[in-house]
Image (cartoon, rainbow, N blue to C red):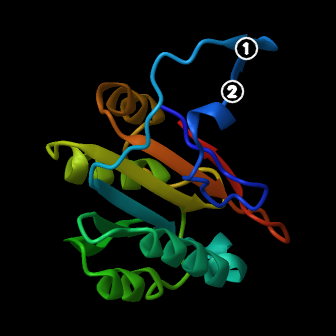
Amino acid sequence: MVSVTDKNEAFVSNLERSQFEVLENGKPQKLVDFYREERPITMAILLDSSGSMHEMLKEVHVAAASFVDTLRDQDTALVIDFDDRVFLIQDLTSDREALRQAVTSTEAIGGTAIFDALHASYRKLGKIEGRKAIILLSDGDDTSSQFAFKRILEQAKSDNTMIYASAWARGSAPRGAAS
């Protein structure tokens, strides 16, 4: 599975097969399957509201709201806020206004429990069938989790959930990655 973004990290969803090329070690590879995914998606938006995010939280709110704006009527999402603890701010819903209010309601304090937030999202999404994605908006390292990286990695390997992470550094724009 591949997601394509432009130079501004915005998703590009209107590519045709003829516009797409996969290279491995610089050599073109044969595309076996190419289609635009149309099934509903269930999304978990994870917001780092630790103290280190204080200066960047407004940007995080804007970024999270932009993910909410991409949802279609058949899609659902939930919002998890985390600092040194994890809070489910909005459970699964297709109500975009409730999701927007949830993503803009956080304040920056405390440590950073990224692994605990990922664990909580896996627990919420784990039994759901279909397409699932976790959107992680954070500035960095886990400092407060009860769960270890190894356990989260095991969950990631056994679950069919895409993780999209955007990392903020002081004074810079977010950097994105998918796994």
Report the disc number at residue 28: 1
Q: Which one is in front, 73 or 143?
A: 73
Q: Is residue 60 above or below residue 7?
A: below
* Label 1 residue SS: strand
Residue positioned 41% across, 84% down in the render: 100
Q: Which residue is mark 2?
A: 21
Q: Which one is in front, 123 or 15?
A: 15
Residue 164 spot, x, y in % from top left: 53, 49
Residue positioned 73% across, 14% down in the render: 28
Task: Note whether residue 113 is visible.
Answer: no
Task: Note whether residue 111 is visible.
Answer: yes
Three-letter code, disc 1 = Pro
Residue 33 spot, x, y in % from top left: 45, 22
Determine which quarter of the picture holds residue 111: bottom right
Check if mark 2's residue and mark 1's residue have beta carbons within 8 Å: yes
Mark 2 → mark 1, Cα distance in angstroms? 7 Å
* Label 2 residue SS: loop
